[in-house]
Image (spheres, rainbow, N blue to C red):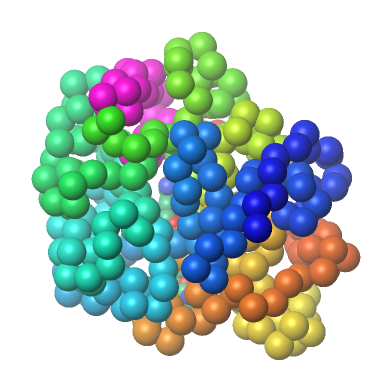
Amino acid sequence: MAVRNSTPSAKNYWGWRSGNCPALQLHMNQLYTVLNTGARMPLLGLGVYDMYDREAEDAVGRALEIGYRLIDTAAMYKNEREIGNAIRASGVPRRDIFLTTKVADADQGYEATLRAFEESSRKLNCDYIDLYLVHWPIRAPLKDSWRALEPLFAEKRVRAIGVANYLVPFLTELDTYSTITPALNQVEFSPYLFLEDLLLECRRRTIQLQAYTPLVRGQRFSDPKLLRMAEKYGKTPAQIILRWALQLGVSTIPKSANAERLKENFNVFDFQIGADDMNAVNAFHENFRVVDDPMGLL
Ligand SMILES: NC(=O)c1ccc[n+]([C@@H]2O[C@H](COP(=O)([O-])OP(=O)(O)OC[C@H]3O[C@@H](n4cnc5c(N)ncnc54)[C@H](OP(=O)(O)O)[C@@H]3O)[C@@H](O)[C@H]2O)c1
């Protein structure tokens, strides 16, 4: 099944069946999106922030066994070596895994970004990286970091390049110094931080939106509205939140190092949230952030 792109309308964007989402495909029992590079990327992945050493290796190994095929790390997470080890030990073909890493704030700037890329590649030791992101829009070296990513992509050192924490003003500014459209923008996004304008702007620009801290680090799991929705669908609060993102066509990368929660977070492909309930979850929005607001960097 492939649902092709069409012009997003302001209000009818909730469901991938509406055709207003990026091209989505059902493949190996999970949803994939097609990036503007033509590469296929699973919509649901594992975030590996705040896991280290053996815990990180075990979590990624378990996740790959369960069926996760997208792993999101960063130089800043200090676990690239372990992620690479787990991928190689898993027996899952490298081509079936989508691996993201990011240039750390301290490594931004043209030459420093190029060096950081070599260092990440060496630690991951995984033949290639699928997606390389500018981790934060740090004011002074911002443009030079992006200018370093473009040749990495052109020379096929990385299969896609993108940004993180780029709210609309940063994307507008990017137009003035980029020649390549980012494949993806990773931002904090959840029902409690429903960035509708950014979602539509990314769609307009063919940039895949990806939700980080999608589970609000558990800080809204006792919200009665969410609990009622979970009860209605016979699912957990985490599963409702993740399924909501997928139905918006938003990629989502929950973190868990716990075997049961890894399974729970992946078990979201067997139900569908109805249109009225999608709109109800959109309305949970309360502009609640766990991580710093990138606008502070503008
Ligand atoms: N680009 C950026 O600037 C940026 C910033 C932040 C995060 N990220 C990325 O986004 C990923 C996810 O965000 P996050 O780690 O900040 O937060 P999150 O995924 O919203 O929440 C993770 C927390 O929730 C717990 N958890 C996971 N599944 C659960 C479930 N089903 N029920 C109850 N608790 C559950 C985890 O504990 P257990 O491990 O014990 O299960 C962990 O404490 C990160 O790992 C990272 O890859 C990117």
The residue that appears at 56% across and 35% down in the rendered structure is: 207
Left or right: 188, with 150 as reference point:
right
Q: Residue placed farthest to the top in the image?
A: 176
Classify residue 85 as left or right of residue 290: left
294 or 274, which is in the foreground?
Answer: 274
Q: Quadrant of residue 205?
A: top right
Residue 38 located within the stretch drawn in magenta: no
**Which residue sits at x=41%, y=73%?**
67
Image vertical order of residue 164 relative to residue 259, above or below: above
The residue closer to the viewer here, 150 or 75, is 150
- Percent across and percent down for residue 54 are 17, 74
Q: Is residue 223 above or below residue 39?
A: below
Residue 70 x %, y %: 40, 59
Q: Which residues are magenta?
A: 132-155
- Report ligand 1 position as a quadrant: bottom left
Q: Residue at x 20, y 27 (%)?
A: 114
Q: Is residue 138 magenta?
A: yes
